[in-house]
Image: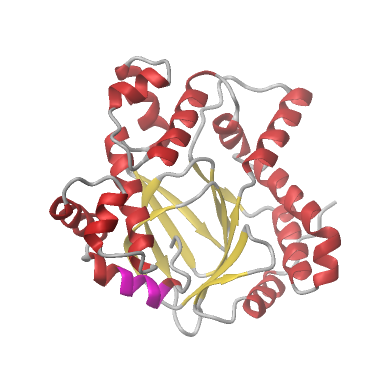
């Protein structure tokens, strides 16, 4: 039986591990802790597959008219990278503290295969890219043990990999884990779209067309459009554009070169078009957005 730790104890541990404003790295490369005192509204984000656990403050994600809450009572799990808009609540007196956990996709696939080998799977469960689930005692329990281990190098060296494996398992067997499992499962239309997303991620700066993407996925263009939007909430062209802009945003913030050069590197033939798209997407020009990221996010990562 899992006995969840008190929220106050989790918060104390997180505060110790996240003394700096913005993203704080930990001894585990797939765990970061965000500390923010700023209220944010309508910020475009693109999360990697994983989960976000908010211990204080609150966030909301908006995709296609749906609202995904992640706060002290709910966590957000992400099966595939999808662009969406985000708002968050925080203040200097009560800063937002959130644990960002990136999936090990090989480990997640192994757990999915084991679960389905033992339990089978429900073909009726619809795959989803984002799910908001209640913070159940097993999740709180493993988070507490993981934060405690991050404070003790010896404990982390011995227990860290097992705790990460358990966290994967708890998310995939949580209240809405079935929708994540369906997205990570290797079969049918969802798998073809997931594999297409992987290809887009690897070749986003190349010239990509929807007919060629659909053909590579072994699907008709209409079926590809429908399956793509059902999983990501956006059209293939919108998705590619968002990915290019988010990649450019990181490159600009990290001073990777002149804006015109970065625009070309992410696949834009026209620097002027890039600048227009960038300002339309982020509501700031490239230099303003880079400054905003450094001020609010620290290591210039996802919001």
Q: Quadrant of residue 75?
A: bottom right
Magenta residues span 290-296
> Which residue is most to the left?
272
Residue 42, x across and y down, in percent: 31, 60
For the point 76% across and 23% down, the residue is 117
Instruction: Residue at the far bottom: name it.
Output: 93
Q: Is residue 272 magenta?
A: no
Query: In front here: 161 or 97?
Result: 161
Quick check: 157 left or right of 216? right
Residue 190, compared with residue 284, is above or below; it is above
Q: Is residue 291 magenta?
A: yes
Give the position of the C terminus as an image quadrant.
Answer: bottom left
Question: Relative to 262, is 193 on the left or the right?
Answer: right
Q: Please tell me which residue lies in front, 264 or 175.
A: 264
Q: Residue at x 38, y 29 (%)?
A: 228
Rendered view: 56 above or below 192: below
User: What is the x, y in percent for residue 83?
Assistant: 37, 47
- The answer to whether residue 100 is seen in the rendering is yes
201, above or below 23, in the image: above
Q: How many marks?
A: 0
204 relative position to 22: left or right:
left
Instruction: Please identify the quarter of the rendering in which residue 124 is found.
Output: top right
Taking depth in this image into account, of 255 and 231 the one nearest to the observer is 255
Q: Position of residue 58 (x, y in %)?
A: 48, 65
Question: How far across and down, in percent of the image, does residue 253 sit?
Answer: 36, 68
**Residue for point 69% across, 75% down:** 13
User: Which residue does the image show at 44% across and 40% down from the upper left?
Assistant: 202
Q: Is the residue 120 above or below the residue 270 in the image?
A: above
- Viewer can see residue 224: no
């Amino acid at each position: 039986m899992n006995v969840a730790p008190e929220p106050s104890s989790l918060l104390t541990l997180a505060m110790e591990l996240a003394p700096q404003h913005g993203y704080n790295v930990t001894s585990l490369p797939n765990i970061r802790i965000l500390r923010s005192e700023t209220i944010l509204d309508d910020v475009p984000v693109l999360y990697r597959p994983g989960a976000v656990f908010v211990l204080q403050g609150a966030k909301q994600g908006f995709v296609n008219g749906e609202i995904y809450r992640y706060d002290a009572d709910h966590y957000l799990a992400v099966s595939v990278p999808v662009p969406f808009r985000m708002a968050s609540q925080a203040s200097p007196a009560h800063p937002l503290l959130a644990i960002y956990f990136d999936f090990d996709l090989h480990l997640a696939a192994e757990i999915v295969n084991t679960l389905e080998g033992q339990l089978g799977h429900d073909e009726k469960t619809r795959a989803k890219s984002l799910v908001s689930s209640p913070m159940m005692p097993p999740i709180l329990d493993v988070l507490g043990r993981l934060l405690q281990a991050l404070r003790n190098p010896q404990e982390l060296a011995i227990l860290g990999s097992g705790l990460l494996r358990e966290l994967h398992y708890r998310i995939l067997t949580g209240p809405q884990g079935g929708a994540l499992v369906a997205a990570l499962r290797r079969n049918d239309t969802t798998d073809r779209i997931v594999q297409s997303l992987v290809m887009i991620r690897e070749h986003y700066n190349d010239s990509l067309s929807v007919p060629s993407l659909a053909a590579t996925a072994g699907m008709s263009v209409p079926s590809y459009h429908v399956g793509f939007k059902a999983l990501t909430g956006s059209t293939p062209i919108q998705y590619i554009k968002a990915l290019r802009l988010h990649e450019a945003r990181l490159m600009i913030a990290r001073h990777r070169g002149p804006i015109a050069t970065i625009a070309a590197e992410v696949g834009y033939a026209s620097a002027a078009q890039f600048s227009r798209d960038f300002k339309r997407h982020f509501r700031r020009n490239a230099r303003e957005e880079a400054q905003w990221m450094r001020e609010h996010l620290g290591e210039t990562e996802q919001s």
